[in-house]
Amino acid sequence: MTRRYLPGLAVFAALTILAAAAGAVLAEVPPEIRAKAAGIFAALKRIEAEAERTPARAVPSSTAAKPGSRSLTFSEDELNAYAACRTEDEPYVKAAVLKLLAGDKIEGRITIDLGKPQASGLIQQKQDLLFAARVETRDGKIRINMDSLYLGTQAISPAFIDVIIGIVSRLQGVEPTTLKDWYDLPPGVLRLESRPGKVVVIY
């Protein structure tokens, strides 16, 4: 079965529909950012390896840790470094910064760069997408509930993002999804919890 991952920054690839003449901009992640993200990458790799050794239907031994009984905490800086590495090859994404709040709430700013000015003048070359959202996670799945969404200073509807995701999905030949759908967390991760400046990975 194909795992469904949160579309995240795929939304911004849809800007190519509106700006066909733009050149792709790929952000290169500096070594110090990669080093800051290394702890998360290593932890997720280890969690996935453990999950593969212990199938979900297997009965854990008395010495094995029960799923959901362990957790790792990472800082906001580590998470942002991880996001920078994961979005390195996303066209048009210049930067992504997340702010972790209590109660599984997040705020974020994603800077997009279309590469060169648009002849039409309808779309600015650089834009910030600002959002506030609540994150739900359970049983290895995640869903994002948008509270507010702005492109620059213009408020936009999450329904508009769903339309863009649908267009991009069809262009890529995959099943259309929406922001309200549940998506897979990294293998072995059961839940996430946000605290001010920290994310807790439960596995």
Image (cartoon, rainbow, N blue to C red):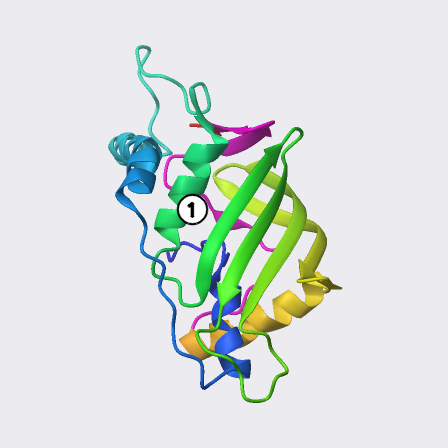
Q: Secondary structure at mark 1?
A: helix
Looking at the rendered structure, the kind of residue marked 1 is Ala
In the depicted view, which residue is nearer to us: 40 or 116?
116
Residue farthest to the top? Answer: 63
Which portion, as a residue range, is magenta? Answer: 174-200
Residue indicated by mark 1: 83
- Is 122 left, or right, of 119 in this rendering? right
Q: Residue at x 67, y 69 (%)?
A: 160
The answer to which image quadrant residue 72 occupies is top left
- Is 193 left, or right, of 25 in this rendering? right
- Is 11 left, or right, of 35 in this rendering? right
Query: In x, y percent, where is residue 81?
Result: 40, 41
Q: Residue at x 47, y 85 (%)?
A: 20
In the depicted view, which residue is nearer to us: 96 or 162?
96
Quadrant placement of the C terminus: top left
Q: Residue at x 58, y 30 (%)?
A: 194
198 inside magenta stretch: yes
